[in-house]
Image: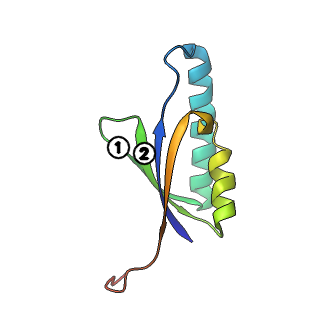
Amino acid sequence: MLFLVRMDVLLPPDMPSAIAEDIKAREKAYAQDLQRSGKWVHLYRVVGEYANYSIFDVESNDELHGLLSSLPLFPYMKIKVTPLAKHPSSIV
């Protein structure tokens, strides 16, 4: 199942920079592991925002929820999930 996911990061302005950097480092490592596994298929930055659009290829809604809720930045994110289906006019 393919999902388009928009993630907006909303770190508290008063979060100590050492804590923020630690969370971001763990987030990067986890995201890269998911990309290597083929679950996180695409990752695109939104220009001018602390946000991204991503494509996930997972077996179920529950699997996606588990992956997203395990992100170290999850408590500081606003997330919008859009399920995707193949378009009948697509040639790929």
Near mark 2 (Cα within 10 A), the count class, few <14, some 14-19 or many ≥20, is some
Specify whether 27 is left or right of 53. right
Q: Which residue is mark 1?
A: 46
Q: Is 44 situated left or right of 33 in this image?
A: left
Residue 40 found in image quarter: bottom right
Q: Quadrant of the C terminus?
A: bottom left
The first of marks 1 and 2 along the sequence is 1
Classify 52 as above or below 57: above
Tell me the residue at 63%/43% (across/down).
30
Q: How far separated are the C-alphas under marks 1 and 2?
A: 5 Å
- Of 78 and 22, the residue lying toward us: 78
Answer whether labels 1 and 2 touch (C-beta < 8 Å): yes
Q: Residue at x 56, y 33 (%)?
A: 76
Q: Residue at x 56, y 23 (%)?
A: 21
At mark 1, the secondary structure is loop
Question: Which residue has dot 2 on it?
Answer: 52
Q: Which mark is residue 24?
A: none
In the displayed structure, would residue 56 be above or below residue 78?
Answer: below
Is the residue marked by circle 1 packed among few (<14), some (14-19), or many (20+) residues within 10 Å?
few
Residue 43 placement (x, y as % from top left): 45, 51
Q: Position of residue 17 (x, y in %)?
A: 54, 15
Residue type beneath disc 2: Asn
User: In the rendered view, does 87 fall on the left or right side of 71?
Assistant: left
Residue kind at label 1, given as amino acid type? Val
Q: Position of residue 71 (x, y in %)?
A: 63, 42
